[in-house]
Image (tube, rainbow, N blue to C red):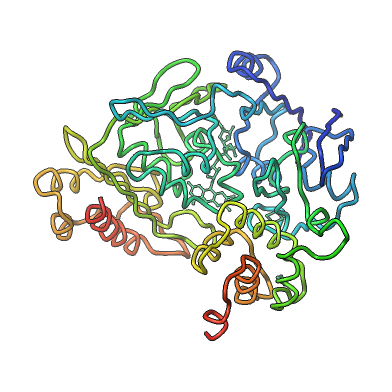
Amino acid sequence: MAKVTMTVNGKSVSGDVEGRTLLSAFLREDLNLTGTHIGCDTSQCGACVVHVDGEAVKACTMFALEAEGAEVGTIEGQANADGSLNAIQQAFQDHHGLQCGFCTPGMVMSAAALLKENPKPSEAEIRHYLEGNICRCTGYHNIVKAILAASGQDVSAIAAE
Amino acid sequence: MYEFDLERPTRVEDAVKLLSDSVESQPLGGGQTLIPTLKQRLASPERLVSLTGIDSMKGVFTDRGGTLRIGGATTHAEVAAKAAYPGLSELAANIGDPAVRNRGTIGGSLANNDPAACYPAAVLALNATIGTNAREIAADDFFQGMFTTALEEGEIITNVTFPAVRTANYQKFLQPASRFALVGVFVAKHDDGVRVAVTGASNDGVFRWSAAEEALNGDFSPDAVAGLDVPDGDMISDLHGSGAYRAHLVKVLTGRAVAAA
Ligand SMILES: Cc1cc2nc3c(=O)[nH]c(=O)nc-3n(C[C@H](O)[C@H](O)[C@H](O)COP(=O)(O)OP(=O)(O)OC[C@H]3O[C@@H](n4cnc5c(N)ncnc54)[C@H](O)[C@@H]3O)c2cc1C
Ligand code: FES
Ligand code: FES
């Protein structure tokens, strides 16, 4: 066992982990932050996407010890300070961007990373960026709409399709 | 996963020492290939030596002559953002997905030598040199068949150097489920001739298509390759595409790369 310390959603946390402990397991099992979902556990689906030092990564494909000293952001840290949904989350609700909701934490975390580096992405750019996020309910159309809306863009063009 | 210790050295010498002592150890790059492998229990090292904490192995540097050097632990995302060099930043920007690109490294990709990986085609066509903690290895000597390279046990890729090139282009035909290349072709025009490297197609891993190189040396145009035969004997044949289909793609993608270069 080794001690690991990191900042998760603004709070400093530490724990004892094995070398093989995944970041996803540390978040879910040690910190009880179960919003980070495990869809595949084989690096394919993106349900486990979190931010490490501001970058989208698959928490199932990184060891907890590799996040030593890092700033980690999860879906639990996305809402506004007063507990209301942030712009991306609200847009997912408004545009019916989720059905069962299993992929949604990863979708929202990927969308947040995209909008940080590209505040007004085109529909094609959104689809390209979301290549690693799989939705079993196949609700991609409304997910793309939600992200366009969250970035302050007109969704009527894509909505008409 | 079986149990192992994870070490995060900050200097190449320390990593090399850890990799060469009596504990059975393996380097860890971005983990985008190795972690899934460990989960399947296809590897069982006693210790992983992470290379991503070694600052001297990270970064993208261009010199005035047009030579590009990339640290072995540099992520695909950083190459995509910073490599001012024909074909390479586009190649890196289309590997897998953003989360894979934020962790996966050029050194890990080359050491793994997956038969469908993108970087091996670039390194072979661009005649790059692979720098390790011990030596420099020419691209033509580095790739030795799928998942096999010239690397010795415990040897780590510290950097990759790409010589200046006149023009180059990479065409990837996406295998949408894996997000790897079903077939990928990298064409590079150097002062002393054209090099064409093909990934995703052959059971022997990445290879140079010499007939196309000869034809393009005479006439650097898509028409020059249109009439050539691609040897389809050792092409990969699987549920995603037959050998003949892949051979056809090799020709089409080579033409597209020449047109776009
Ligand atoms: C969903 C998905 C899609 C992908 N799509 C593509 C794609 O389109 N094209 C593509 O090319 N790749 C693709 N990949 C693979 C990706 O590029 C990996 O990042 C890469 O193959 C391995 O790099 P890594 O740094 O993650 O290495 P790791 O997984 O850490 O290591 C891989 C192997 O290399 C060794 N190693 C690592 N670093 C070094 C080093 N510096 N020196 C010596 N040995 C080292 C390790 O011991 C291990 O054997 C994809 C992966 C995933 C999960
Ligand atoms: S659970 Fe991590 S990518 Fe699917
Ligand atoms: S909403 Fe069900 S998996 Fe995406």
Q: Residue at x 30, y 39 (%)?
A: B125
Left or right side of A24 for B203: left
The image quadrant that residue B235 belongs to is bottom left
Ligand 3 falls in quadrant: bottom right
Left or right side of B140 for B39: right
Place of residue B195 in the rendered image (x, y in percent of width and height, measured from the top left): 24, 40
Q: Residue at x 28, y 42 (%)?
A: B208
Place of residue A37 in the rendered image (x, y in percent of width and height, measured from the top left): 78, 58
Q: Where is A92 relative to A119, above or below?
A: below
Question: How many numbered circles does the render carry?
Answer: 0
Left or right side of B23 for B232: left
Q: Residue at x 45, y 39 (%)?
A: B82
| Outermost left residue | B218
Which quadrant does the N terminus of chain B fall into?
top right
Place of residue B67 in the rendered image (x, y in percent of width and height, measured from the top left): 33, 28
Place of residue B221 in the rendered image (x, y in percent of width and height, measured from the top left): 15, 54
Q: Where is A8 relative to B134, above or below?
A: below
Q: Residue at x 39, y 20 (%)?
A: B136
* A7 or B240: nearer the viewer: A7
Left or right side of B129 for A143: right
| Outermost bottom residue | A160
